Amino acid sequence: MKLKRKKGIRKTDNDVKFKLIMFFIALIFSMQISAQFVVQTPNYNYPHSLSKNYLKSYYKIPFRIIKSPFSWNRKAWIKTLSCSILIAGTYYFADNDINRFALNNGNDNLLNISSKLSIISASRNLLAFSAGGYIFGKICKNARIKQATLLSIQSILISGGAAFLVKRISGRERPYSGKSYNKWRGLNTDDNLSSFYSAHSTTAFAFAAILNSLSRRKKITSPIYYGLATTVALSRVYEQKHWTSDVVTAAIVGIFFSKVIINTQFEESKISMSPLFGKDLRGVKLCFSFN
């Protein structure tokens, strides 16, 4: 859908510019809060094959997501409350103004770039990229590539599936409809009523969190992975496909889901230890296996 940009409209006032700046701060803040949910566990303990435990985890993870709040400690609840306040704040104080800013300030070239970015970041394309990466890892016998791609596939499928379900339940009007940000229609099958929350953004952030968790140089990779995911989120707002609160929610949910996936796979591993003896050799053998 090609959006018609309004020309000749006076530039946004200082108040709206301030809200736009606050949006960027809010998105960065949301990443910092939710990224703390991701537990940094040893890289070698993740699956690197289509094992039975890996496949079983596809139905275990949704239940863990539902049950996880019952096991949260005080610190986790404070983080969750902070994220909730952030989402509510962008909903009530930023959605309309930032949508108006995106509509009135832009050009066709930026819109074309944004549209191409949305196509690249679609779930099906991320899945194809991850599947290709897994095949490449198998050919090269590279366990780290296989780990990254298997966890990425899982994060895309689960986070994308959750977003699809919420979209059908909430029925929020998309910005391009011209309706107010607070129009929610409930149960629906209409794509025009599937603004909340952004599937592109949530899979992008889940994908970024998984890749970053496997990185040995997180100080370098974090700005790259999360920066690319943020660009995807901004493109969805710019194209009038989502409100600001849609992409902020998506970022938080995507990173949280990645945490559950990482922890589930970590706990599914089996660790064994046995003495090791040989000529001029004394030690202990530590084995990590997946059934």
Image: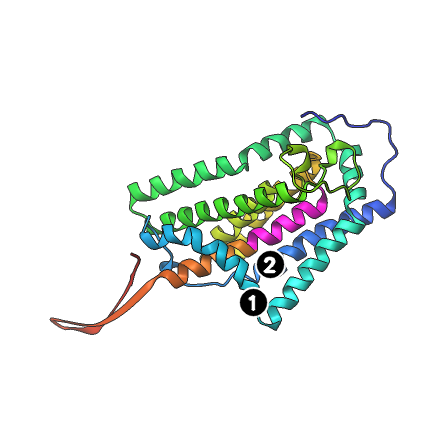
Q: Quadrant of the N terminus?
A: top right
Residue where numbered disc 2 is placed = 34
Image coords of residue 154 (percent x, y): 45, 48
Left or right: 92, with 119 as reference point: right
Looking at the image, is 269 positioned above or below residue 128?
below
Question: Given the current orientation, which residue lies at the most extreme left position?
Answer: 279
Residue 39 in magenta stretch:
no
Residue range (magenta): 243-255
Colour treatment of the image: rainbow
- Tell me if residue 9 comes above or below residue 288 in the rendering: above
Q: Residue at x 34, y 40 (%)?
A: 136
Look at mark 1 in the image and give the residue it sits on. Answer: 70
Horizontal arrangement in the rendering, residue 52 relative to residue 71 (left or right): left
Q: Is residue 268 left or right of residue 95?
A: left
Query: Element at badge 2?
Result: helix
Residue 246 colored in magenta in the image: yes
Label 1 crowd bin: few (<14), some (14–19), many (20+), radius 10 Å: few
